[in-house]
């Protein structure tokens, strides 16, 4: 499918093999470890919300900057809803949208595959690494 610069129309199906299709950019965004972890943590809290600090606590190794960028990307894509309480300082809450919840199933399958086959992939990498 050839897409316009603005992207595909609502309901239109993308074509990964079309270099102009925004599907490629979307896969880049949803295919990161931080996106997968954030979606998992938010899915576990669904239908509830989590604050930024709680998300960060549940995602070991993520920096504040990376989590912020990940959540902004997920919100921009309509996968995460952001609610701000007008307090000082503001309290920001995040939850998965219906679209985000629909992504969790697919990401869960990929996470399970990675965990199950991690040792085999590590062995393959070691076999292809140059000897010291």
Image: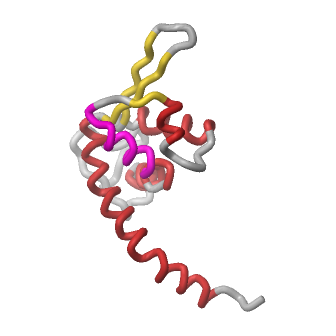
Part of the protein shown in magenta: 36-47
Let me know if residue 65 is in the magenta part.
no
**Where's residue 92, x and y in %?**
47, 22
- Is 10 rendered above or below residue 128? above
Total tally of numbered discs in the picture? 0
Front residue (pair 96, 31): 96
Determine the main secondary structure of the stretch shown in magenta: helix
**Where's residue 65, x and y in %?**
62, 37
Q: Which quadrant holds residue 79?
A: top left
Looking at the figure, which quarter contains the N terminus?
bottom left
In this rendering, does residue 20 appear at all? no
Q: Which quadrant holds residue 24?
A: bottom left
| Residue at the (49%, 54%) spot, across then down | 32
Residue 56 appears left or right of 105: right
| Residue at the (53%, 86%) spot, across then down | 124
Residue farthest left in this picture: 11
Residue 23 appears left or right of 46: right
- Is 114 rendered above or below residue 93? below
**Where's residue 51, x and y in %?**
46, 28
| Residue at the (41%, 49%) spot, across then down | 26
């Amino acid at each position: 499918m050839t897409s316009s610069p603005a992207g595909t129309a609502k309901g239109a199906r993308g074509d990964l093999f079309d270099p102009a299709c925004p599907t490629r950019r979307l896969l880049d965004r949803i295919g990161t470890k931080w996106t997968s972890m954030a979606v998992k943590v938010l899915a576990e809290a669904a239908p509830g919300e989590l604050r930024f600090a709680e998300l960060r606590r549940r995602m070991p190794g993520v920096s504040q900057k990376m989590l912020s960028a990940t959540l902004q990307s997920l919100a921009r894509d309509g996968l995460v809803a952001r609610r701000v309480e007008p307090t000082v300082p503001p309290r920001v809450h995040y939850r998965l949208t219906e679209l985000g919840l629909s992504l969790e199933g697919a990401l869960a399958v990929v996470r399970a595959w990675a965990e199950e086959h991690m040792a085999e992939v590590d062995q393959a990498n070691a076999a292809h690494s140059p000897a010291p």
